[in-house]
Image (tube, helix red, strand yellow):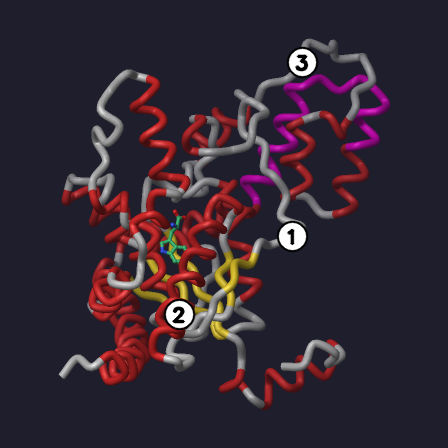
């Protein structure tokens, strides 16, 4: 699509030539429960992107195996995260939505890519380097606790991406290096066979994605233990919101909305008018933090209540959830098989 196409024509073009829509793909690591940082930082932007791209989103369960060795947990995490994305509005008729483990072509491609992935490239991967660094600091063996799954993680991720001819890979900043590695590996393959066998992907860092403050004011993240789970019960949600850290200003003191976590969170859930009203109440003084938190709870709960009930509904019908994922896997495999046919033929296997 030429860059100069005006937006209104672009929409029409997308509508008329769906087959030429660019492909967006991303993997979702099923570790733990989803929180509102995931919702605003990853889920919502990915769903928005799916309106303009041919989207393929999958649950990266074999990536999770590097860490999660408990079978019950691995299985339930994958299902919960899948249900979470569906409850958040992912339409499986619009997005090819599947479990990585249901597409065995991924692992065949990963094997091919290994032959084009230098060990030096893997040595430079951030996650591996961080693990080694941590060991060195503890005076431990540099590779203690590092399995080959972690070491070759970027190569498996490259297979996920390259298998589906992805144009863009929406990811957080921490994953851009992996996407660049996928592009490097694809180039090495194409160079060797003197053919554009694999499409060169690029990372798409979504702008305008707010940093979501956690309960303690740091960025909301599972590793900081400061999250608000997306599907917390009403009671749990209330309890957590009452725990948002505030300063020690008194009730009558005027307060600054922009430096308040409560207000930052409020903005994500309230409409423009509500935001203006609450900002005014902050500035006027006379409103204590407890009251601000109650306001926050009201808008968060209003938004999350329907999501929570959809989530519970989906989780209660395991058969249907499996059927949705199986249908997605079917679509994904038919694309994957094409890619593998092209590759096997080009590399001289059989
Ligand atoms: N590594 C990603 C993460 O930790 C998950 C992932 C696996 C992924 N395979 C992918 C992301 C392919 C994008 C494309 O979040």
The quarter in which the C terminus is drawn is bottom left
Q: Secondary structure at mark 3?
A: loop
Q: Which residue is mark 1?
A: 207
The percent coordinates of residue 108 (x first, y second) are 20, 68
Say if 65 sits above or below 88 in the image: above
The percent coordinates of residue 158 (x first, y second) are 36, 60
State if disc 2 and disc 3 touch (CB < 8 Å): no
Span highlighted in magenta in the image: 279-302
Residue 156 visible, this angle: yes
The percent coordinates of residue 200 (x first, y second) are 47, 69
Q: Residue 308, labelled with which disc?
A: none
Which residue corresponds to the image point at 34% horizontal and 71% vertical from the top-left? 163
Which residue corresponds to the image point at 56% horizontal and 71% vertical from the top-left? 51
Mark 3 CB within 8 Å of ligand 1: no
Q: Which residue is mark 2?
A: 92
Q: Nearer the viewer, mark 1 or mark 2?
A: 1
């Amino acid at each position: 699509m030429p860059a100069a196409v005006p937006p209104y024509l672009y929409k029409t073009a997308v509508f008329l030539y769906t087959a030429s829509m660019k492909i967006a793909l991303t993997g979702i690591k099923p570790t733990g429960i989803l929180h509102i940082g995931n919702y605003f930082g990853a889920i919502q932007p990915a769903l928005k992107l799916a309106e303009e791209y041919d989207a393929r989103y999958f649950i990266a369960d074999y990536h999770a195996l590097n860490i999660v060795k408990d079978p019950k947990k691995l299985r339930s995490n994958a299902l919960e995260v899948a249900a979470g994305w569906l409850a958040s509005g992912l339409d499986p008729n619009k997005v090819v939505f599947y479990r990585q483990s249901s597409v065995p072509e991924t692992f065949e491609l990963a094997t091919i890519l290994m032959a084009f992935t230098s060990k030096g490239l893997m040595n430079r991967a951030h996650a591996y380097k961080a693990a080694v660094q941590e060991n060195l600091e503890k005076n431990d063996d540099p590779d203690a606790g590092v399995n080959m799954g972690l070491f070759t993680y970027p190569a498996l991720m490259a297979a996920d991406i390259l298998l589906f001819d992805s144009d863009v890979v929406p990811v957080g900043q921490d994953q851009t290096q992996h996407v660049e590695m996928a592009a490097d590996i694809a180039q090495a393959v194409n160079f060797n066979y003197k053919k554009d066998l694999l499409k060169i992907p690029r990372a798409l860092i979504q702008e305008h994605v707010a940093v979501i403050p956690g309960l303690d004011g740091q960025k909301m993240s599972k590793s900081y233990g400061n999250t608000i789970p997306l599907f917390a019960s009403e009671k749990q949600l209330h309890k957590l919101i009452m725990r948002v850290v505030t300063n020690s200003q008194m009730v009558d003191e005027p307060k600054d909305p922009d430096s308040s976590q409560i207000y930052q969170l409020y903005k994500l859930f309230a409409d423009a008018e509500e935001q203006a009203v609450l900002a005014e109440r902050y500035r006027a003084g006379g409103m204590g933090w407890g009251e601000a938190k109650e306001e926050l709870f009201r808008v968060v709960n209003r938004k999350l209540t329907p999501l929570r009930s959809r989530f519970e509904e989906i989780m209660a019908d395991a058969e249907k959830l499996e059927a949705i994922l199986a249908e997605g896997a079917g679509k994904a495999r038919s694309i994957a098989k094409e890619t593998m046919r092209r590759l096997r033929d080009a590399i001289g296997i059989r």
